[in-house]
């Protein structure tokens, strides 16, 4: 799902047709929502019953803190290039990093 998100969001920036761009953005949003469910399911599977609330809170807090930097970086990229291609490619690259992390965790049983 992370891989599909990364590809979809990157393709949305380079589509010459706005209808296709909207389609790829919709696919990206859908797959991003799938990843959210998977990540929270994974943290519940890794945590003991007594610490699942704390684990989920820490995951959500750290995720929101890191994610708050994305609009800042995207703004810098848009200002520097006067285009959304760099900003959307940044999102795609972040998704590819997430995809790589999941590719490491899934074979280990997480």
Image (cartoon, helix red, strand yellow):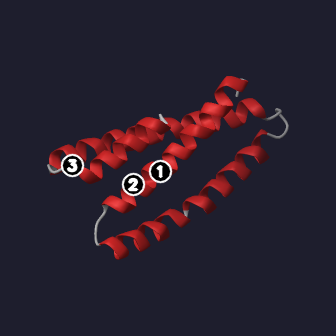
Total marks shown come to 3
Looking at the image, do the residues carrying marks 2 and 3 touch, with CB atoms under 8 Å apart?
Answer: no
Looking at the image, do the residues carrying marks 1 and 2 touch, with CB atoms under 8 Å apart?
Answer: yes
Q: Quadrant of residue 32?
A: top left
- Alpha-carbon distance for marks 1 and 3? 18 Å
Task: Say which element carries label 3.
Answer: loop
Which residue is at 79% across, 35% downward? Answer: 47
Question: Residue beneath label 3, please?
Answer: 15
N-terminal label among 1 and 3: 3
Question: Residue lying farthest bottom?
Answer: 79
Q: Percent position (x, y) of residue 108?
A: 72, 25
Q: Is 105 above or below relative to 28?
A: above
Q: Percent position (x, y) of residue 79?
A: 35, 76
Looking at the image, do the residues carrying marks 1 and 3 touch, with CB atoms under 8 Å apart?
Answer: no
Question: Residue beneath label 1, please?
Answer: 93
Which residue is at 37% across, 56% downward? Answer: 88
Which residue is at 54% across, 38% downward? Answer: 99
Task: Say which element carries label 2.
Answer: helix
- Alpha-carbon distance for marks 1 and 2? 6 Å
Which residue is at 19% across, 43% downward? Answer: 20
Q: Quadrant of residue 86?
A: bottom left
Question: Residue beneath label 2, please?
Answer: 89
* CA neighbours of label 1 inside 10 A, class few (<14), some (14 to 19), many (20+): some
Q: Is 8 above or below relative to 104?
A: below
Q: Percent position (x, y) of residue 48?
A: 83, 33
Q: Quadrant of residue 27?
A: top left
Q: Which mark is residue 2?
A: none
Task: Say which element carries label 1.
Answer: helix
């Amino acid at each position: 799902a992370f891989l599909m998100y990364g590809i979809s969001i990157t393709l949305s920036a380079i589509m010459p047709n706005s209808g296709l761009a909207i389609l790829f953005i919709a696919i990206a949003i859908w797959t991003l929502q799938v990843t959210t469910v998977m990540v929270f399911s994974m943290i519940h599977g890794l945590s003991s019953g007594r610490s699942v609330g704390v684990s989920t809170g820490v995951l959500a807090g750290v995720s929101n803190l890191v994610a708050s930097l994305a609009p800042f970086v995207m703004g810098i990229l848009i200002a520097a290039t006067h285009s959304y291609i760099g900003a959307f490619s940044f999102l795609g690259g972040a998704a590819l990093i997430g995809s790589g992390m999941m590719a490491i965790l899934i074979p280990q049983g997480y």
